[in-house]
Image (cartoon, coloured by chain):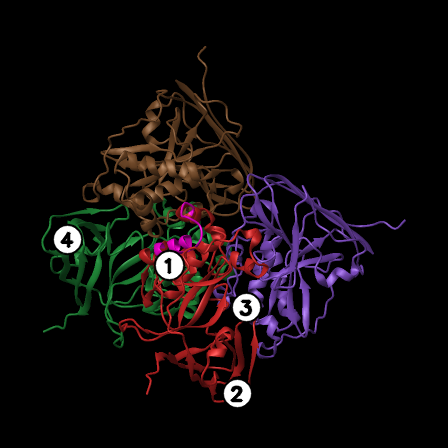
Chain colours: A brown, B green, C purple, D red
Amino acid sequence: MILRLGYDIQFELPAPVAIVALLSVHPSRVADLRAPDELRLDPAVPAETYVDTFGNRCTRFLAERGLIRLSESTLIYDSGLPDPIRLDAREVPVQDLPHDTLRYLLSSRYCEVDRFSTIALELFGGVAPGWSRVQAVCDWIHSRVSFGYQYARPTKSALDVFTERFGVCRDFQHLAVTMCRALNIPARYATGYLGDIGIPASPDPMDFSAWFEAYLEDRWWTFDARHNRPRIGRVLMATGRDASDVAMTTSFGMANLKHFVVVSEEVQPA
Amino acid sequence: MILRLGYDIQFELPAPVAIVALLSVHPSRVADLRAPDELRLDPAVPAETYVDTFGNRCTRFLAERGLIRLSESTLIYDSGLPDPIRLDAREVPVQDLPHDTLRYLLSSRYCEVDRFSTIALELFGGVAPGWSRVQAVCDWIHSRVSFGYQYARPTKSALDVFTERFGVCRDFQHLAVTMCRALNIPARYATGYLGDIGIPASPDPMDFSAWFEAYLEDRWWTFDARHNRPRIGRVLMATGRDASDVAMTTSFGMANLKHFVVVSEEVQPA
Amino acid sequence: MILRLGYDIQFELPAPVAIVALLSVHPSRVADLRAPDELRLDPAVPAETYVDTFGNRCTRFLAERGLIRLSESTLIYDSGLPDPIRLDAREVPVQDLPHDTLRYLLSSRYCEVDRFSTIALELFGGVAPGWSRVQAVCDWIHSRVSFGYQYARPTKSALDVFTERFGVCRDFQHLAVTMCRALNIPARYATGYLGDIGIPASPDPMDFSAWFEAYLEDRWWTFDARHNRPRIGRVLMATGRDASDVAMTTSFGMANLKHFVVVSEEVQPA
Amino acid sequence: MILRLGYDIQFELPAPVAIVALLSVHPSRVADLRAPDELRLDPAVPAETYVDTFGNRCTRFLAERGLIRLSESTLIYDSGLPDPIRLDAREVPVQDLPHDTLRYLLSSRYCEVDRFSTIALELFGGVAPGWSRVQAVCDWIHSRVSFGYQYARPTKSALDVFTERFGVCRDFQHLAVTMCRALNIPARYATGYLGDIGIPASPDPMDFSAWFEAYLEDRWWTFDARHNRPRIGRVLMATGRDASDVAMTTSFGMANLKHFVVVSEEVQPA
């Protein structure tokens, strides 16, 4: 299956501002690309790319005053298979976890693990460890948090989601990530493309999506507390501790979003 | 000048628990060591060391049920010079910052940069950029926050410090780090030894200390919003986004602190 | 000047629910009424009225499952004069305040006075006490907080407004009330009708409005940190510590708002 | 049974400060007094008493700069009976509650009912309504929150207690009050004397105590989520929405506590 991916994002800038964009396909998917993956800037300004400590490809540039457009359109091969499931994947005792997974057990801006240690145990301490426990976290959140764009706000943390029970996809995942960490299961926040491949059309406009990954057995597995079912066509862009690490764009100064379109769709065979 | 460094920390564990310790001297100071820097565990259990993504040397082990003692005593050479000052060190525009400093501009668990962007500008937007601005942040915090061990709590964030105006050294630095980041100055949290070298004896028992580093001109500089004056004899152990990244010990299970002694003193020449 | 006041509010109730409505004109304005002030319930259910400890007229009833409509239309005389100003109104030392104003110095749900005592002094401690100080609070908030319906949320407190700098009228007033109390000036939250009498038409649909009252000299005075200028045609409905005390409707169970229209306009003379 | 009650509280004041004290026995217990209930001020300053809107007897005065001592010693008759229990006391549907209990269903500074509506239902929605539900709230809190003076802080709210699981008596009651209100059971915070009558001596120094009252059937009943068993010798001083309303002393300016002794003990018959 070939997917067309792309976006058209425009900001109005009252003054020049440095921007870091995490809009590239994740290095783990680069081999699947069928067309160049290249952020176009209009007006063109010099840009640098680098890989951050989480392994994400970042692009940074100084945007000039006025309107700036970030856009691209590329093609990627996808297996067309839904997210893998392995029901017998075990939790790894902390002492046996790989070194580089340990940081995904700690608190971060939107994931106050230190405030959930007892709550998580009360809710999920009795569930069989391993895949079923992460799934129980997802089920709990999916059934008790309601989705709505009007509930989004940049400072919303897992604790806010836990008390308000409303949010957007980022909020569902923050709460799930926090619960997993509080149970000593490494969990990280993930962003990327997620089209409506194989499911009835959704009324919402296409957007980037957030999901999360939990470390079980010997690898990271995809979970999604918002949709809470295996999906086809996820294309990972970035992983990090939480949304603070992997914002699509981080502007170090004022930037007013004027236009935002994301595309992720199957290319019909000729 | 030769300093004797050491600690004796004891936990009572109701069950086996995985522990990560950041109790080693920082790699940047290893060349100064005059004796082995080795964490002793009693009872002895197998331990592994590794370097985390922040560049800190970490030790991890599975502690058995019962009492566990972490201790060491080592020697290190120190220049005996106070923290360097460079009044004309400039702020680096975000677009010119090294890639690896950018993560120290973002929000983290105890540093809610996203909630301080306007406050920081209101307080320090009018101060001349560069060294003087970071110093102004330190002066402000030093004169408006009161120190007291009774005000410590593990979940206290920069916003809590800003409203409560009480805290321990970690709290002073969290607020300073947050203000700097909100001003687009990379800032990171630092922990280590800080004895009373060259100053009148303090009534407080010796403890590890926290300070912070700000990136100006072309390097990281030591600042300390609690003491707010150049000190002699800091020995860096770890840097990270905030206290969550660089806790002396992180226990993934219950661990009751029973004993805690830290030593950092000049060894008198014979 | 005669104003026509009214509303049409409809809820869909999945189950019967007790509701308390503060939709009557405040007792202090009853003498100005030129038509009955009567909440109509459709379907009709028995309702009781009472006066709460803040002096507001409340109506309570048990609404049945299904759609319930709360509506009324009445007429009231208004002087047509703008909010009174008395620039030389003095702050009253706490020891001389009337007993019943003291509760308006304390913390309440959305007004965390205990977290603002230092901040308020830093910002307004140097301003001349009295009317000018309350006005300085309003000026500060009016110029630094941006209005937008998308920033409303039920749990938003003064501290949230202080850090986010976005909100609806209730948020502006909560921050102002909190600042005043932290300065030892009694302040209470007020709700009522506020039409666009005497000002160019606003693009926003008519809504109830919130403002606040501060106690100076020998009485309560109207201030409004959102509009921040004297207005014509305010009709007070209720005062309390904050929005929690004087919600237009408090539903003790699920109630989905389906329709909401408020009218407040000058009746043209024949 | 005759109890001797008293206190000796001393503040150091850097400047004159207005103080409101809620240190009188509650009007509902005045008939039991066997000696005058009179706050002594040393140095003597004029004081006024009044009853606040919650029905508490308050004393207010302007304390001079320097040391001020508030003290008294009185005698009161007590039945010697433990807190009454009525297991079949029913919850009153909101529509049938007396008007003046409704305010004890709303959010207040330390009781964020709006953030607990779902949590309370999840935890206690399945428990039989009435006395048993309030008792279930107390049992849950009593068994899951740990007591410790080191965990006290003035800004701690019910949500903080729920996540931290540590606190002093006020914190236990704030969480219980919040849970009850979220279940539509009126609940109010209570303060008073509570000696160790009839129980083995406690190692803690005597202090004032906090408990709470829930409205069931046709009256307010005493509950205590900290001790969680019927006690002998409670002497009520004040009730209110939460600790903000009924602080023993509220100082409108700086006041440093220098001495604090409370007495509540049975007077041995001759």
Q: Which residues are magenta?
A: D125-140
Q: Which mark is residue B156?
A: 1
Q: Are marks 3 and 2 in contact (CB under 8 Å)?
A: no
Q: Is residue D53 above or below residue B28?
A: below
Separation of residues labelled 1 and 2 (CA atoms) = 40 Å
Judged by depth in the image, the label closer to the viewer, 3 or 1, is: 3
Specify whether residue D136 is painted magenta. Answer: yes
Badge 1 crowding class, 10 Å Cα cut-off, few under 14, some 14 to 19, many 20 or more, is some
Q: Position of residue D5 (x, y in %)?
A: 40, 80
Separation of residues labelled 3 and 2 (CA atoms) = 26 Å
Q: Are marks 2 and 4 on the same chain?
A: no
Separation of residues labelled 3 and 1 (CA atoms) = 34 Å
Which residue carries the number 3 mark? D54
The kind of residue on which mark 4 rests is Arg
Which residue carries the number 2 mark? D45
Q: Residue furthest top?
A: A270
Specify whether residue D240 is painted magenta. Answer: no
Q: Quadrant of residue A54?
A: top left
Separation of residues labelled 3 and 4 (CA atoms) = 53 Å
Which residue carries the number 4 mark? B65
The kind of residue on which mark 2 rests is Val
The kind of residue on which mark 1 rests is Lys
Q: Are marks 3 and 2 on the same chain?
A: yes
Q: Is residue D177 above or below residue A147?
A: below
Q: Is residue D113 above or below residue A251?
A: below
